[in-house]
Image (cartoon, rainbow, N blue to C red):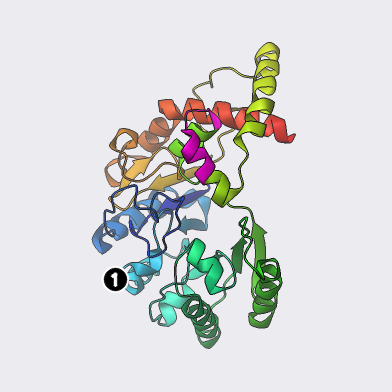
Amino acid sequence: MQMKWFIVEISGVCNARCPFCCTGAKTHQSSGFMEPSLFEAIIAKISKDYAYLGGIPVYIYNWGEPFLHPNYVELMHILAKYPNIYCMTSTNAGYVPELDEISAKMIRRVRLSMSGFSQESYDHIHKLPFDKVVRNIEYLVETFDKYDAKCDDFYIAFFEYPFTHPGYEDEVHKAREFTERLGLGLSVEKPGINDLRSYLDFYLGRMSEDRREFYNKYLNLDYAAYAKKAKSMRSRLKKSGSLKPPVVKAFDAANNCLTGHRVSINQRGELLPCCFVPYDDPQLVLGNFVELSADQVEKKLQRKVSICRECMEVNTVSLAISGK
């Protein structure tokens, strides 16, 4: 099995309040920040054990806001000691620390998540001061330019929500003008359910009606329409033999594992089955990453926990419905 990238969660907290996110909605307990010493131990292990990858991409985010880490610049200086590793990050830009030359140059990919382009839209989702977000994005661009930081991918992920307030239909256009002015990319995306347990409860019909309506309000998900298609598709797949328990083989494409070839590590340094599971579920912890050999990491990811089987079944059905 060949890993392609690593997700190292440095922050278990977030300043945004997205109502459908387990971090923003605080449905999971915050567990603080990764200690710099633990971060260095993890990075040193990745650099050594996976040197065969050449340039190793490390995403320093998953459920939390990485820029909130009180020692963010120090963590970037740690990364700078390992030339075969490069950093990718995502931020809501509600807070941005003062970056020096090293910390700016260590970031090779920046994904800026935006929930609209007005304070009214932000009041629905991120619940952050929109003007401050804009200023912080401008600061990042200016800082990268100042230090001639070579960022390979610097873009705004603009999430479209089913809002109806006046002027919302023009916000994508305003975001596009903003990115063009700053020389950034723009990706217009559809939001979705971002934690695995809620995802499975929704698509397997285990979620309460009130909760389904909640997701429909914010994410425009029509469970009734999906369920009708899924019932027919599941029957067809079973008859054809395409819907069967996954073989015990790590990240086999036939298993429809959407997070294949990723190693996910939470802020306590614990190995998780994938980046889709919340960081605070002890039933899903596979061990201490630093204490595991590369072979042990592979074997633990190969075994697949019970929740993986449900995820693969839902993905098999969903991909078949979409024709992918």
Residue at (28%, 58%) from the top-left corner? Answer: 34
Q: Residue furthest top?
A: 239
Is 304 or 134 nearer to us in this picture?
Answer: 134
Q: Which residues are magenta?
A: 203-214
Residue at (59%, 72%) from the top-left corner? Answer: 117
Crowd tier of the residue under label 1, counting other residues whose Cα lies within 10 Å: few below 14, some 14–19, many 20 or above: some
Q: Position of residue 263 (x, y in %)?
A: 44, 45
Q: Which residue is mark 1?
A: 70
Which image quarter: residue 66?
Answer: bottom left
| Secondary element at image label 1 | loop
Is 106 magenta? The answer is no
Q: Is residue 251 above or below residue 18?
A: above
Q: Residue furthest bottom?
A: 146
Left of 140 or right of it: where is 256?
A: right
Is 129 or 199 nearer to us in this picture?
Answer: 129
Q: Is residue 159 above or below residue 21?
A: below
Q: Is residue 199 above or below residue 20?
A: above
Left of 269 or right of it: where is 131?
A: right
Residue at (53%, 20%) from the top-left corner? Answer: 247
Q: Is residue 41 visible?
A: yes
Which image quarter: residue 286?
Answer: top left
Is 212 magenta? The answer is yes
Left of 282 or right of it: where is 8?
A: right
Q: Is residue 109 visible?
A: no
Is 59 or 318 nearer to us in this picture?
Answer: 318
* Image quadrant containing the C terminus: top right
Residue type, mark 1 in image: Pro
Residue at (50%, 57%) from the top-left corner? Answer: 57
Left of 1 or right of it: where is 74?
A: left
Q: Position of residue 199 (x, y in %)?
A: 50, 38
Q: Position of residue 257 (x, y in %)?
A: 55, 35
Q: Position of residue 129 (x, y in %)?
A: 45, 75
